[in-house]
Image (cartoon, rainbow, N blue to C red):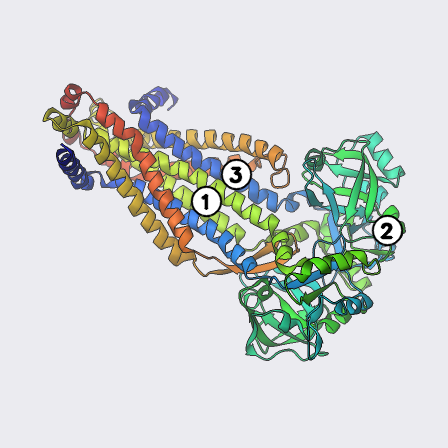
Amino acid sequence: MAGNTLSQIAAVTGLNLRNIPQRLATTLVALLGIAGVIVVLIGVLSIAEGFRSVLQHSGAPDIAIVLRDGSNDEMSSNLSLEQARLIADLPEVARDAQGPIVSAELYVVADIPRRSTGTAANVPLRGVSPSAARLREGFRIVAGRNFNPGTFEVIVGRGAASQFTGLEVGGTVKLGSTRWLVTGMFEDAGSIAQSEVWTDAKMVQGAFQRGASYQSMRVKLTSSKALGSLKDGLSADNRLGQKALSEREYFQELSKTMTTLINTVGTVIAVLMGLGAIFAALNTMYSAVSARSREIATLRALGFGTQPVIISVLVESLLIGLLGGLLGMAVAYFAFDGIQTSTMNFDTFSQVTFAFTVTPTLLLLALVYALALGLVGGSLPCFRAARLPITSGLREL
Amino acid sequence: MLKFLPLLWANLQRKKLRTWLTLASIMIAFVLFGMLQTLGDAMTGGAQVAGADRLMTTHKMSLILSMPQAYVNKVRAIPGVKVVCLHNWFGGMAKTPDGEELQIPAFAVDAASFVDTYPEFTLSATERRDFVNDRGTAIIGRALARQFGWKVGDVIPLRSAIWERSDGSKAWSLRIAGIFEANNPALYLHYEYFNEARKVGRDSIGWMVLRIADTQRAGPIGRSIDALFANSPTETKTATERAFAQDFANQLGDIGAIVAAVATAVFFTMLLVTANTMAEAVRERTSELGVLKTLGFSSRSVTVLVLCEALLLTLLGAVLGLALADVLALLLAVIRPDMFPPTGMPVQTFGSGVIIALTLGALAAVLPSIRAWNLRITDALRKV
């Protein structure tokens, strides 16, 4: 019996698939509809993925960032030279032959035109101390050389160089009231630093009227366990009025608005488009069933069960979902993966550059979604096919 | 033409299920369109709030740098400038009723000139007087009041992420003097109070917003302001408020292009669905169209009937979809006042939506219309 049912399913499904050419237009509409949904779904979620990947590569567990107590980001923080010295002397700070591994930094934004549109964008300019590179494990110069401290020279992150004008190695860029020579380009394992322009902290203090003060301090801890005691030490010393966070905590906190925004918008778009695609798929499968009502009735009159008929409709619509999904996946992968872009991170008031990232998980998710769309699209029409009274089905033209 | 409406309607009713499904996908497309427009509008919202007669003067290098408070009086003296209001970013933080601490756009301003600079931020006469006369007060936008559950008369502890008071505390207590109705979820407090109490940075301001008498002279006035401070340690940049808002929106970068791409993909899919429905409808009714032609309908009127049917379908879907989007946008404004404006979907979306619907309907009807036009009576009637 089971073998009989299987062969019936195969026979009816084969019949369905063979007459697809007769209703090519409707089938293509459903297929392209699902493909369109998948392209958009992957496109939107790959932005979120790319953004997340930047944050994942930002921040090591044994690096702490010290901000003024009450500030949430570097831009609104403040740290005097004296405070910076006191912090460098704390026992939790790792040291080597050259002394404590810390970098007192300044973080400001400068107007630099975006390459694609020519409109001004807030590009982050970071003034760093000589040890800054030692605090970022992935840091390396990929073109040119590092800036010379005390001169109007900058190095640019790979992301920033790709998105904003005038950041080519060897060129000059106007930051504030002066022109700066771009001496090199750096990478930092895909972290958020790659969106930034770096120079000597002392030069930023001068150019942006910051006197001798800094805004934040990066500290290499003796071990990642030392963070707790650093936090306690800072809150106990009221000369400092500073607080410490792990670099990772800091970046997570500073991307909340953006991550929520992208995820909310992405989900809303995916759900709505999915609904639209379901309606298109339902339309297709209903017309597929009604176009074949006579054949189905004939089969039923010949003794085929309702089960094979139901399954055959479902198989067809799943197949449409599968093909649409695969098409959408291919288009999205080739159209989006790796495209560099940048946007404003509201929490830091500055630009973040990132790449659309189509991950295998994302592709799998999209495929499941495509199959689900196909399945729902076929689920109602298949019952209509099964319930069709034989006599009226045969009478239809 | 109107007398054929019942015929069009009857044709659409012929396969109810198909009509409803097509209508539903068109509707969804327009719901999405409406929502994307609302969101896009919210993100570039400043551009609408911006008044044509308002200019903004900032530090030439960056908005984050400050300028001397003395600049205000110098700008006020320039001919053609009606009123100047200084602004200073406050970096306000406050807790929602759920206990989550959020950043809110809070600005220290000169209250008396503020109410003249932004007359569209409507306050009652009492609220206005209270705000201007009491330095310990603040006014807030309706959306902010809703989000944090604040009422007029409440005393709120606003924390600043940037500014400390000279006594070392970070909490600034403010009494809410008024709530204004504008698409602007912000808080404004007195600069005088703020400036006297802050520990560092006294007598510096963030930027100035000024109103001018003649919008035609925005360019010359802006240039004379910037010329006034040229070659000083703090040079300025003056532009219309709209230009600043637009610059800020541009900071979002390619997001706008992505939204446009999504909308295009959605409408392309919808075009396919509608075109397919129309093609099927015409194919099924071949013999009926033949009968119409036999009765003396010209090729043109038969084609117009097909075209109108497609237009009716897309237009109906568009209107229903846009109406639904409007309701959803208002609903979302209550749930997420930080992301969606209280005004709901921008009104002009209805206009652009209807134009898109008509275009798509016409495109979808192209092939079926040609078929109806070329249909020969003998062929049509031969078909069963």
Q: Nearer the viewer, mark 2 or mark 3?
A: 2
Query: From the viewer's perspective, is residue A212 above or below residue A323?
Result: below
Residue pictured at 16% horizontal, 21% vertical: A390
**Residue annotated with mark 2:** B165
Residue pictured at 75% horizontal, 73% vertical: A202
Amino acid residing under circle 1? Ala
| Upstream in sequence: badge 3 or badge 1 | 3
> In front here: B190 or A139?
A139
The mark found on residue A281 in the picture is none
Q: Secondary structure at mark 1?
A: helix
| Upstream in sequence: badge 2 or badge 3 | 3
Q: Is residue B42 visible?
A: yes
Q: Position of residue A299 (x, y in %)?
A: 13, 29
Q: Chain of mark 2?
A: B
Amino acid residing under circle 2? Arg
| Upstream in sequence: badge 2 or badge 1 | 2
Q: Chain of mark 1?
A: B
The mark found on residue B263 in the picture is 1
- For label 1, count other residues whose C-alpha is less than 10 Å away and answer few (under 14), some (14-19) or many (20+): many
Residue pictured at 41% horizontal, 42% vertical: B267
**Residue annotated with mark 3:** B35
- The image quarter containing residue A156 is bottom right
In the rendered image, residues at marks 2 and 1 fall on the same chain: yes
Q: Secondary structure at mark 3?
A: helix
Q: Position of residue A360 (x, y in %)?
A: 40, 55
